[in-house]
Image: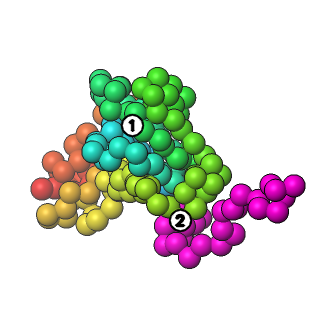
Amino acid sequence: IGEWLNPPPSPPRRTEAKFNKVVLKRLFMSRANRPPVSIAKLAKEMKGKEGKTCVVVGTITNDVRLLDDSTLKFTVCCLRCVDSARARIVAAGGEVITFDQLALRAPTGSNCVLLRGVLKSREVYKHFGKAPGVPNSSAKPYVRGGNGKNRKIESARGRRKTCGYKV
């Protein structure tokens, strides 16, 4: 009967924490605006932050260039985790949790480190900017024979006027 009279305190129903507002805003973002984060970046950012939870609103990917798995001993909360990355984090003694579990552990985002991937790392950003061929432009042209499929198509671009432009 004593337990009924004094139930354990439940987590608050609503919080005004800024952390939650940022996470909610990122959850509504499109896939292009939720870039992936590699475990190497997580290991680098979480160095010296033992006992804190790493929060990524997006995908966590594996990185074969990271050789020392002992740096992955921390708690990660993410929308999605690649199987190989999850296996490496768990093998190192860390854990991967969902946002529901995070809401119960840290309703206001205390002891959480919020990270995100590099937005401009998508290939399309290489094509943006001044038109290719214009002086001081470093934009990559969209060419017909791209991806190495057509060896001779547009191979003279920039060398003569008839093939796009002449430098």
Q: How many residues crowd mark 2 within 10 Å: few (<14), some (14–19), many (20+)?
A: some
Q: Is residue 115 left or right of residue 90?
A: left
Task: Give the labeled residue for mark 1.
Answer: 39
The quadrant of the image that shows the N terminus is: bottom right
Earlier-in-chain disc, 1 versus 2: 1
Q: How many marks?
A: 2
Visible residue check, residue 145: no
Helix, strand or loop under label 1: helix
Circle 1/circle 2 CB separation < 8 Å: no
The label shown at residue 131 is none
Inspect the image, locate mark 2, and give the three-letter code of the amino acid beneath it: Thr
Q: Nearer the viewer, residue 24 or 32?
A: 24
Height in image: 15 above or below 116? below
Q: How many residues crowd mark 1 within 10 Å: few (<14), some (14–19), many (20+)?
A: many
Which is in the foreground here, disc 1 or disc 2?
Answer: 2
Residue 80 coordinates in the image, percent (x, y): 57, 42
Q: Identify the image quadrant of residue 25.
A: bottom right
What residue is at 42 percent from the left and 38 percent from the top?
A: 74
Inspect the image, locate mark 1, and give the three-letter code of the amino acid beneath it: Ile
Q: Nearer the viewer, residue 19 or 120?
A: 19
Q: Residue furthest right?
A: 1
Task: Give the labeled residue for mark 2.
Answer: 108
Q: Nearer the viewer, residue 82 or 48?
A: 48
What residue is at 35 percent from the left and 26 percent from the top?
A: 69
Residue 154 coordinates in the image, percent (x, y): 30, 43
Helix, strand or loop under label 2: loop
Q: Identify the image quadrant of residue 145.
A: top left
Label 1, label 2: how many angstroms apart (C-alpha)? 25 Å
Q: Nearer the viewer, residue 43 or 156?
A: 43
Residues drawn in magenta? 1-28
